[in-house]
Image (cartoon, helix red, strand yellow):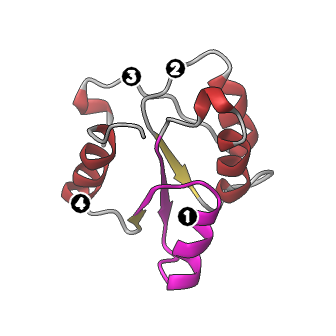
Amino acid sequence: MMQDTHCTIKMANDGLQALEQLKSFAADIILMDCQMPRMDGYTAANKIKEQPKFAHIPIIAMTANTMEADLTKAKESGMQGYIAKPIEVQTMFEVIAEHLTQKPL
């Protein structure tokens, strides 16, 4: 879905790969699947936000689990928003646009 937007997209199969890719790729936003093998999205988001150089990058949870406890867990791990699965394309782009246009504190 994102490839038609003319954005540069990097994909990671798990949280460990995401952390490794951030060493050489300047991301404007991270869409983080919460349920990944080896290192889940919650842990990866925590590890990303622990690094001051990445603190400004919005991380958006992508999850089918949208109960209040799940959303609280995403927020506590450093994620700023969420996109519910199954993904509604228009909603996804609205959430991305909202977080890309926010100014850091």
Q: Residue at x 23, y 31 (%)?
A: 5
Tell me the magenta residue range. Answer: 58-82
The residue carrying pointer 3 sits among few (fewer than 14), some (14 to 19) or many (20 or more) residues within 10 Å by Cα, namely few
Quadrant for the C terminus in the image: top left
Q: Residue at x 54, y 50 (%)?
A: 32
Residue type (three-letter) at the residue carrying disc 4: Thr
Left or right of 23? Residue 70 is: left
Upstream in sequence: badge 1 or badge 3: 3
Q: Quadrant of residue 100?
A: top left
Residue 55: percent from left, percent from top: 58, 37
Q: Is residue 31 above or below residue 91?
A: above
Upstream in sequence: badge 1 or badge 4: 1
Residue under label 3? 8
Q: Secondary structure at mark 1?
A: helix
The residue carrying pointer 2 sits among few (fewer than 14), some (14 to 19) or many (20 or more) residues within 10 Å by Cα, namely few
User: How far separated are the C-alphas under marks 1 and 3?
Assistant: 26 Å
Q: Is residue 71 above or below residue 81?
A: below
Residue under label 2? 26
Q: Choose mark 1 or mark 2, whichever is in front.
A: 1
Q: Nearer the viewer, residue 37 or 92?
A: 92
Q: Nearer the viewer, residue 75 or 90?
A: 75
Residue 30: percent from left, percent from top: 49, 40
Residue type (three-letter) at the residue carrying disc 2: Ala
Q: Secondary structure at mark 2?
A: loop
Q: Residue at x 60, y 60 (%)?
A: 34
Q: Choose mark 1 or mark 3, whichever is in front.
A: 1
Residue under label 1? 75
Residue under label 4? 91
Upstream in sequence: badge 1 or badge 2: 2
User: How far separated are the C-alphas under marks 3 and 2?
Assistant: 10 Å
Residue type (three-letter) at the residue carrying disc 1: Lys
